[in-house]
């Protein structure tokens, strides 16, 4: 009977080796080692072997086969179990390193793009970039810009005050800058003329957000202080900027206006190639009181200044209908640009 036992063992070993899941293996075990398996059938026949030696030999072969098969099953179960655990871990793993292989890797926000292009154009015109703090004193933001306490123009800036009492000062004199103009003062106080700077930055006003207003927005300020600067230098600079930034088909004009920190003051508009005019910002000759607040002698130095909104540039360039869309971080909006 030994050859039949060997045959049954080999068949079972082969099936065990071919089982490729734990469930498959259990099925093989039931089939080959269960009550209806070949080995079970042979075992029943052991008692019927008359020859004692042959019976003993067959019994030993049966025992050895069972032992060998049980070892093989354990080994295979270990292998398959390990593989399955790995597979399950792999399947359940969260991939936190998502990357895109389609070449789109994100880009700068459209306001940042406008900001950087503006800087580039002014750097090309010979300006350098200046900076100032976002939390300002009311002296830099108003007083030094010829808007003393009680000046009606202060009311036009819906100022956000900071809950801070400066040493020796009082509450209500620390604020979030309402415009980039205080950088004019800080620059004059720290740099020797000639001064040719632009100061892009974040500004704040107590405004309820709507399609054209945000309480936080961006401006770029320009300041030139040199000897013998006149209104024509201002007009020429605005015109050179307009052509460099918008294109050769655009032109600019100044319209008389009023700002406390410039005299005379103007608003500047640009004309699009289709002939339509668009109001861009304010400008003027720096008021002598402002030059003086900057620590300079207005009889020796004169200059011009201008300021306008950066967000509007991005809105115009990309045809954004609602300025709030630029600040809600909706990927469907951001991805368009
Ligand atoms: N600071 C003004 C504002 O926020 C804009 C402005 C007007 C800036 C005239 C200037 C200027 O430098 O000369 O409305």
Image (cartoon, rainbow, N blue to C red):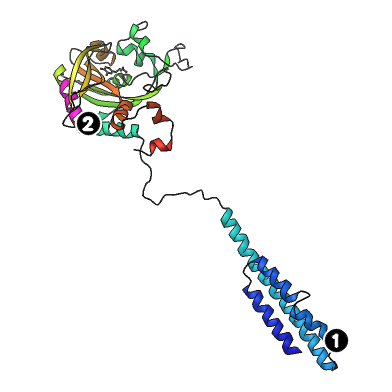
User: Which residue has dot 1 on it?
Assistant: 47
Q: Residue at x 72, y 79 (%)?
A: 68
Task: Bin the neighbour count of mark 2 within 10 Å (Cα to Cα): few under 14, some 14-19, many 20 and up.
Answer: some
Residue marked by disc 2:
245
* SS state under label 1: loop
Quarter occupied by residue 70? bottom right
Where does the image place residue 148, in percent across and percent down from the top left?
A: 34, 8
304 vs 120: above or below: above
Q: Does residue 148 sit above or below 321 in this rendering? A: above
Q: Where's ligand 1: which quadrant?
A: top left
Q: Main secondary structure of the magenta part?
A: helix
Q: Nearer the viewer, residue 111 or 119?
A: 111
**Image location of residue 210, percent across then percent down:** 40, 21
Q: Residue at x 43, y 35 (%)?
A: 330
Locate residue 238 relative to residue 21 in the image: left or right: left
- Whether residue 297 is visible, yes or no, is no
Q: Is residue 256 above or below residue 18?
A: above
Can you give x and y, in whole percent of width and height, for residue 189 in the image? Answer: 29, 20
- Distance, label 1 to label 2, CA atoms, is 104 Å
Secondary structure beneath dot 2 equals helix
Residue range of the region highlighted in magenta in the rendering: 235-243
Q: Quadrant of residue 55?
A: bottom right
Quarter of the image with the C terminus is top left
Q: How many other residues sit within 10 Å of disc 1, few (<14), some (14-19) or many (≥20)?
A: few
Q: Is residue 241 magenta?
A: yes
Screen quadrant of the N terminus: bottom right
Left or right: 62 in relation to 21: right
């Amino acid at each position: 009977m030994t050859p039949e036992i060997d045959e049954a063992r080999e068949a079972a070993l082969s099936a065990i080796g071919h089982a490729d899941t734990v469930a498959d293996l259990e099925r093989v075990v039931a089939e080959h080692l269960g009550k209806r398996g070949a080995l079970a059938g042979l075992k029943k026949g052991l008692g019927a072997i008359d020859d004692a030696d042959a019976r003993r030999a067959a019994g030993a072969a049966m025992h050895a086969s069972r032992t060998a098969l049980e070892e093989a099953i354990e080994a295979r179960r270990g292998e398959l179990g390990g593989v399955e655990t790995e597979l399950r871990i792999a399947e359940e793993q969260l991939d936190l390193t998502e990357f895109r292989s389609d070449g789109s890797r994100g880009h700068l926000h459209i306001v940042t793009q406008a900001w950087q292009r503006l800087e580039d154009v002014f750097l090309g015109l010979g300006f350098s970039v200046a900076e100032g703090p976002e939390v300002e004193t009311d002296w830099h933001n108003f007083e030094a810009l010829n808007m003393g306490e009680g000046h009606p123009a202060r009311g036009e800036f819906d100022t956000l005050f900071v809950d801070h009492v400066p040493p020796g000062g009082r509450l209500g004199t620390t604020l979030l800058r309402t415009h980039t103009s205080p950088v004019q003062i800080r620059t004059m106080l720290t740099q020797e003329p000639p001064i040719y700077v632009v100061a892009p930055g974040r500004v704040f006003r107590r405004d309820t957000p709507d399609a054209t207003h945000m309480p936080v927005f961006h401006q770029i300020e320009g300041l030139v202080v040199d000897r013998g600067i006149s209104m024509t230098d201002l007009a020429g600079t605005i015109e050179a900027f307009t052509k460099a930034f918008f294109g050769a088909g655009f032109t600019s004009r100044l319209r008389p206006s009023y700002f406390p920190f410039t005299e005379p003051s103007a608003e500047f508009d640009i004309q699009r190639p289709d002939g339509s005019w668009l109001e861009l910002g304010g400008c003027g000759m720096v008021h002598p009181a402002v030059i003086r607040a900057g620590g300079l002698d207005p009889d020796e130095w004169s200059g011009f200044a201008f300021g306008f909104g950066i967000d509007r540039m991005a809105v115009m360039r990309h045809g954004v209908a609602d300025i709030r869309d630029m600040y809600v971080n909706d990927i469907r909006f951001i991805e368009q640009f």
